[in-house]
């Protein structure tokens, strides 16, 4: 069973119900779409991606994208030796990048990000048992984010944990 979610059209309470329905249906892909929709109500982000972390290769592999044309699922990025990889994947800390300079400094695909009009980012590591499973990422057109934005993004990361566990079990 696939649960269809349009991130822009869902009120916040519908987001919680959609997440619950997706998990009840054992549909992790639908859960990620529903989490994107639920977070959108708080963040107003223009792009959400979810990446699995391959610790051996120090790479992230995209599992979900709200814009699959620009950032298709299956795409990957090498994070070996990067400050971002150390901060988010190894130290398991939330990364907040505000403004075009931060985007340019920390992301090799900064031109693509800026072409989409995105000027800030929140990357949330999804961690279970001190192991980073991946990240949930929100990119916004505004240059700055608030503490409330970071908390909403962190909640989305927590909501994504069962989806990560299900997807990793399927692999």
Image (spheres, rainbow, N blue to C red):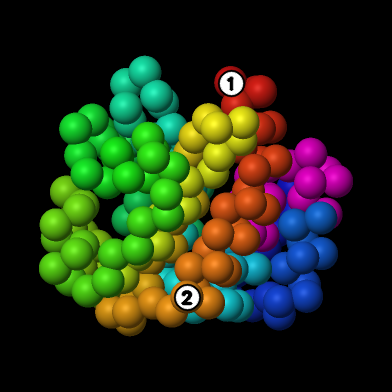
Q: Is residue 24 magenta?
A: yes
Q: Is residue 47 above or below residue 55?
A: below
Residue 51 location, x and y as percent? Answer: 45, 42
Category of crowding for the residue at label 2, using alpha-carbon neighbours closer than 10 angstroms: few (below 14), some (14–19), many (at least 20): few
Whichever of labels 2 and 1 marks the residue nearer the N terminus, that label is: 2
SS label for mark 2: helix
Residue 118 visible (yes or no): no
Give the CA distance from mark 2 to mark 1.
35 Å
Q: Position of residue 139 (x, y in %)?
A: 38, 66
Q: Which residues are magenta?
A: 21-35
Name the residue tied to disc 2: 147
Queried whether the magenta region covers residue 121, the answer comes back as: no
Where is mark 1, residue-wise?
171
Q: Residue at x 28, y 79 (%)?
A: 143
| 105 left or right of 158 in image | left
The percent coordinates of residue 15 (x first, y second) are: 72, 68
């Amino acid at each position: 069973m696939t649960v269809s979610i349009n991130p822009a059209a869902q009120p916040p309470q519908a987001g919680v119900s959609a997440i619950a329905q997706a998990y009840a249906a054992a549909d992790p892909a639908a859960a990620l779409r529903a989490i994107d929709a639920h977070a959108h109500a708080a963040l107003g982000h223009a792009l959400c991606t979810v990446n699995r972390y391959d610790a051996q290769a120090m790479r992230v592999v995209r599992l979900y994208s709200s814009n699959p044309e620009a950032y298709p699922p299956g795409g990957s990025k090498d994070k070996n030796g990067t400050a971002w990889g150390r901060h988010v994947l190894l130290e398991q800390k939330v990364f907040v990048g505000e403004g075009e300079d931060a985007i340019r400094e920390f992301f090799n695909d900064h031109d693509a990000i800026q072409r989409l009009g995105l000027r800030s980012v929140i990357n949330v590591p999804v961690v279970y048992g001190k192991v980073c499973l991946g990240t949930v990422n929100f990119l916004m057109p505004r240059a700055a984010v608030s503490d409330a934005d970071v908390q909403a993004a962190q909640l989305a990361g927590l909501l994504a944990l069962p989806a990560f566990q299900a997807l990793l079990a399927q692999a």
